[in-house]
Structure formats: structure tokens, C-alpha cells
Image (spheres, rainbow, N blue to C red):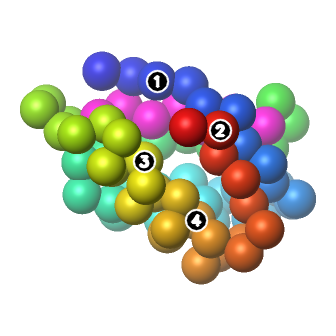
Amino acid sequence: MKKTYSIEVDCANCANLMEETTKKVNGVANATVNFMTQKMIVEFDEGADEKGTMKEVLKACKKVEPDCEIEL
């Protein structure tokens, strides 16, 4: 399953780092972060808990950019 989230990210480099970080979270099959549109597209592994996975994604992204926000 794929879902699109609104995201607040300050620069293109941070968006790239957040994308790479998100791909490493358990339950995420693939992820794309677009700085220009301020959107994150996450493809979840089969049977993954979407809400739990996105909480872990947010935690991981805050390590890259502490003031980032993802509209869950």
C-alpha cells in the first residue's frame, strides 16, 4: 500500500537524507520525499502497521531535521 503525507522540510539535502532514513525503517518498502511539493510517499511492506511505522518514520526523520513535521 502507498500513502502520501504532507511534510515540512527545509532544504533539498534534508529531503534526500529523510528519504534515505525512511527507507531503513522496518515496515517501509520504499519512500520518496519531494522537497518542492513538500510531500512524502511511503510504500509499506505487506502487513505492516501503517500508524506504528509512520511514528517510527517521524522519529527517524527528526534525527535528520529536528523541526520536521509529517502530517499523520
Residue extent of the magenta highlight:
38-44
Q: Position of residue 7 (x, y in %)?
A: 72, 42
Question: Type of residue at label 3?
Answer: Met
At numbered mark 1, what does the secondary structure look like: helix, strand or loop?
strand
What residue is shown at x 46% (from left), y 24% (from top)?
A: 3
Q: Which residue shows up at 59% across the image and 78% down it? A: 63
Q: Position of residue 9 (x, y in %)?
A: 80, 54
Q: Secondary structure at mark 4?
A: helix
Dividing the picture into quadrants, the one containing residue 46 is top left
- Residue identified by numbered label 4: 61
- Say few, some or many: other residues with alpha carbon within 10 Å of mark 1 (under 14 / 14 to 19 / 20 or more): few
Q: Which residue is mark 1?
A: 3
Q: Are marks 3 and 1 in contact (CB under 8 Å)?
A: no
Disc 3 versus disc 2: distance between alpha carbons?
Answer: 10 Å
Locate residue 7 relative to residue 4 in the image: left or right: right
Q: Which residue is mark 2?
A: 71
Q: Secondary structure at mark 3?
A: helix
Q: If you read the primary sequence from the N terminus, does the residue marked by circle 2 or circle 4 appear first? A: 4
| Label number found at residue 54 | 3
Determine the main secondary structure of the stretch shown in magenta: strand
Give x and y (percent) for residue 41.
Answer: 53, 31
